[in-house]
Image (cartoon, rainbow, N blue to C red):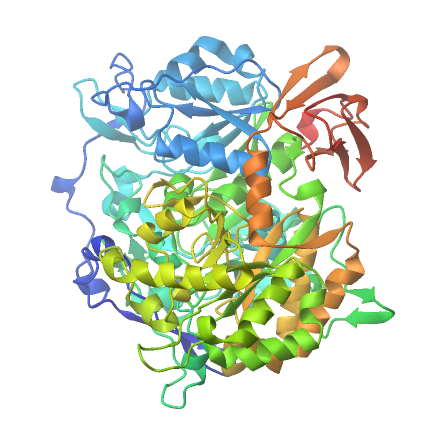
Amino acid sequence: MKPTLTLAGPSTRFSGRFRPAPVAWLAALLLCVSLVGCGGGADTEAANPQSAVASVPQGNAGDSAAPAAANGSADQPVKAAVSLAAPDPGLLLLLVPDGIDDQDPGIMAWEDAAREVGVRMAPITDSQFLGLGTSGALAYAGLVLPDQIHTVATDQLVQAVRDFTSAGGRTLLTFDFAALTRRADGPLVYPIPKSRLSDLAGVDYVLYDKYLDHTVGLGPVTAMRSTLRELLVPPGKSEPFPTTASVASLTANGGAGTSGTTKDRMLAAPASASDLGSQVPLLKAAGVGPGQALYLPVSPSDPGGVHGFDPQQYQIQPMASPSELRSPDRLKELKAGVGFGQAVRAAAPDQASRFFPAGTKAFGAFGGGSGSTAGGRAVVRNGLGDNGPDVLQAYNGYALGFLVYPSYVTEGSYAGTVLATSPQFGLVAGVQSFGAGRVLFVNLPLTYLKGRTDALPMHGFLQYFVQHLLGGAQLSSMPNGVAGMIFNWHLDSKEAQQPALQLERAGIFNVGTMSIHMTAGPDAVTPGDKLGFDLNNNPTMQAFLRRMDAKGHSIGSHGGWIHDYYGLNANETNSATFLPYLVLNRQAVDNAVGHATRDYSAPEGNNPLWAMDWLAQQGVVSAYFAGHTGLGVTRDYRDGTLHTPSLWVVPVTPMGNYATFEEFQDFNVPKADVVNWYLDLVDFDLAHNTARMVYAHPPGAYDWIDVVQTLEAYVRGKGSSQVAWYTMPRLADFMAKRNQVQWNQQSLANGVTQFSASHPVSLKEMVWRLPKARYLRPTTVSGGSVADGGTVWLVKASSNARTLTFRAASNTLPASF
């Protein structure tokens, strides 16, 4: 069994219950009783030097060795060749090894992330990059150096990257890129004494020669709240992290990270960095005591050690139904089982960098605001929420508390702007100048995380790179460029019938379109309990669904016929047993509304791959998803690859450890805090031109109907031209259409850029956002129009246009970003 995680909730205790993960994945985890029995063994000494991977001093690597293929392996066969894209000042280059397949899942993950962020990215091989030379590479927007895909590099390539950046290039350097080199006699090794790109990163890292199997740590990632919002981390996906009095003082005085020296920043640190086990539930569950830290052993086959800990388990959500939470026979506990893989406990590093992150502006063009009006009634906050003083926060997981991520131990000072840190291991992210160029260093395995259902860090740091280092134009991910909210109602059992009807009478379903999903069988918890809707024989709820459908809401299935039974028992090995439950549920809901439905959510967040495959075959285009939490509508990446390309997943955004009204109520979350979170989320969506999804059950929502009404009034007060309610299929359809847009940029004389876009059917609802800090008002527009969007120019395609062209002159040099 796996260790049990218990989290402290407001005024009471909180823990989490996980449904079983896929059996194949659990094979390596179910042997674990605790960290000690989870592949990590007991507390460890430093790794035995005799078993260490051989290293070579920097500069002695065998540049004459054959160029590495995929991830540096010359043994991998060449598949589809990577074609070099034409020069384009808006195109990002993803540096990949020679011989890699252009359909490699890692490449696809980055390209999909770029499309969703609203920019374009193309792979470029080592040979192509070297062939371009520095001046040729500078004709593109910037260079992305990915983790996992490209862990091996020659000294020649490393120097070419350095030359590009020094000459004015913008570079995104991630985690284990070029962590290894090939020795002259063949073996892959770690350079001595540190990464050859440490000067580019701004700190010393990949210190294998010193730390051996303690080179990579596993712990929380902290940043100022304002910075996390710029990294697309929505309110509720990060939570305040304890800090020392000195840090609090620095923050109150504007933050050492904002204007102080590197020395000042190094004096400040999260509270009790040497005893994080008492503050981070996941570390406590791993048995981390005072003065200890978790590490992931590394090797040439896994130079960042990331395969020793699987973040995909974060998607396995403890989503109890209202009947479970409210049962008098059930303790109000949700227990989360967490496997720690190959992680080991050992003494925390005493020479790692210590920084306090800098803050950034909290919101962009539209601002957050503390209130809004609707129908003459002001919506006023009881508390500041995100509008309060900037504070240190950390990435947080639904029912998990502070999440833990792999990062290399770093040493030395840092001359740049600190964005994110590890309390024990040093710098996680920062921006610094390098010659005439700039570097965003991200000490996280972004590719690996996205492939294991945590795409938010990749998308967030890519967004930051585009906005703050490139000042790039972006294609909005929202229809007509209008931000929004997604509200997903889960009707689990007949217990929700009367509350749903009462919410209808109160007008809750009259404000905009929402996704409404029902578990339709006669039972709810166990077969034969007769607690379900029995939709086939329930004319009241059949009529309710038809009314909701007529209003434009998206009706869909919530699994699984028997809510808890399906959610707790369906897995990757028993499709023969549980596929009929999906079929029955879909038939009942489709029959009730009179047409095929295209929307879905899974009981307990349980989405086996066979279920997603079947749903896609039925024409379902959107599904609630318990992975990639805090992100907007995205692709179904898991197990390291893209699944069901036609079915978009809609991740839930939690409020810290909770997400539903029943959880808020049962775990004593103050109502005012919930209101502030909802309003902050609206402001976040508006500020970042995005949409995030929240979900609820009618019973708890009706108990706190005033909170729902306040949220709806706040959205209404913003105006429909600024914020809209979206259903899940509405955004899935838009994203699918948006993926067919082809566009490019061309540099003309005198700093003018020509933009050209096309779509095989229509560019209707497509909007480009150009930052005013870089571009003057676009001119010579054909096939669209220009509007003022605050800090950006909005170029909107005409409804009947299949092509769009316009020009924009430079407002300032890119170096200002």
> Residue 782, position in %: x, y?
78, 21
> Residue 372, position in %: x, y?
80, 64
Which quadrant would the C terminus be assigned to in this image?
A: top right
Q: Is residue 358 visible?
A: no
Which residue is painted at 27% across and 41% down in the image?
Answer: 210
| Above or below 758: residue 413 | below
> Residue 577, position in %: x, y?
25, 62
Q: Nearer the viewer, residue 526 or 104?
A: 526
Seen as rendered, the residue at the extreme right is: 376
Seen as rendered, the residue at the extreme left is: 50
Which residue is painted at 62% across and 72% down in the image?
Answer: 674
Question: Quarter-wise, where is residue 380 in the image?
Answer: bottom right
Q: Is residue 669 left or right of residue 104?
A: right
Q: Is residue 291 left or right of residue 490?
A: left
Question: Quarter-wise, where is residue 346 in the image?
Answer: bottom left
Seen as rendered, the residue at the extreme bottom is: 328
> Residue 2, position in %: x, y?
24, 67
Which quadrant would the N terminus be assigned to in this image?
A: bottom left
Which residue is painted at 40% across and 66% down in the image?
Answer: 604
| Above or below 51: residue 243 | below
Question: Quarter-wise, where is residue 205 in the image?
Answer: top left
Q: Nearer the viewer, residue 10 or 29?
A: 29
